[in-house]
Amino acid sequence: MTIKFETKIDFMNPIWNRDAWSRMQGDLNPENQKITDTRGIVLGVKPGEAVKELCGFEAFLATRLVPQEDGTIRRLNREVIFYTNPRTGEIIESWTNPWTGEECRVVQVANDPFNYTISEWLILAPEDFKSADPEKAKPRKLPLIFPWQQFGPDLLGLSTDMHLYYPNSLDPKKFVRESSGPMVQVSEMMRYNVSRKDLENPELTSVQYSGTWARITPWLPWMLMGTEAGHVVYNGAMCSSPTTDIISPQALEYAKQNYPQFLSAPTEDYGPSHSSLEIYARTQEPAPPRAA
């Protein structure tokens, strides 16, 4: 059953923000899924030198929304990130580290599921999950009010930024070459462009958007950079659609052959959800020492 939703735009109303965000992220008709596709470049940032272009990436998500009796909305989601040749878009299985010259085996990201609850409240994760102060370790709960911007009569812009610092799932004593250290510092910044008329339309259980996605994160484990100073930056453009048509032909064919279930959103709420680092730690073996 489709949930009723607010269409009268009110930037300071948490209920309207919840419903607008849900319609952008998915479809309030649970029979329908939504696809988000993001493509761009992975950059390497190392102190004392120019930024390097390391590889390309294409990520897509298959999402289904399931309204709950308490008014919240479960976002059921599968997501992948495929690493690519930035010129051709072809998915790569190996990558040459430009600093070490080593040929590295690429590990694609495949998270199933990655679910969370959308409500009128914004849950902010604590900055340090290991804080000795129990009060500081509790997530902060704030009304869901996003920083919207209006550009002209019909274009609305939305920014969502997240800055996290949490324990690394890759134990540096075990994953000596993969782990960036005991803690992980990550920032994720998304920019959405959406039609005001679409958000005001009561016939649309889902609204489409375009925008950008950027992520600052430690070296990817399979790059085998360990605790070397520096980090990577994902920088990409994103859009949404009710179908898989927005996925590139290369990524779509690769998914059909290797990850077919990720082209469809979950129909049931199962879990638990794990981050890509948790899944890497569970599924991969530590790399052997580098040859002399």
Image: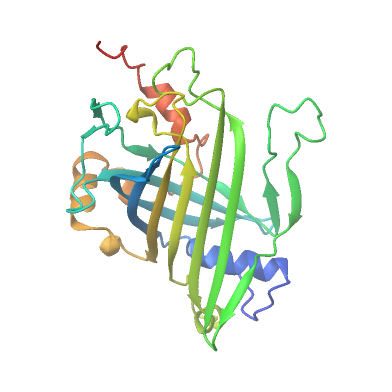
Q: For this view, does 242 lie left or right of residue 153? A: left
* Residue found 39% across the figure and 61% down from its top: 238
| Depth order, front residue of 135/255 | 135
Above-or-below relation of 95 to 56: above
| Depth order, front residue of 256/132 | 132
* Residue found 42% across the figure and 37% down from its top: 46
* Residue found 60% across the figure and 75% down from its top: 149
Quarter that holds the C terminus:
top left
Residue at the far front: name it: 48
Residue at the far bottom: name it: 153
Callout count: 0
* Residue found 45% across the figure and 37% down from its top: 47
| Depth order, front residue of 69/75 | 75
Residue 99 seen by the camera: yes
Residue 112 rendering spot, x and y as whole percentages: 42, 39
Question: Residue 221 falls in which quadrant of the image?
Answer: top left
Q: How is the image coloured?
A: rainbow
Residue 247 rendering spot, x and y as whole percentages: 27, 58
| Depth order, front residue of 260/190 | 190
Residue 18 rendering spot, x and y as whole percentages: 64, 64
Residue 1 seen by the camera: no
Above-or-below relation of 17 to 52: below
Residue 237 rendering spot, x and y as whole percentages: 38, 61
Above-or-below relation of 222 to 144: above
Question: Residue 258 falls in which quadrant of the image?
Answer: top left
Q: For this view, does 79 lie left or right of residue 272? A: left
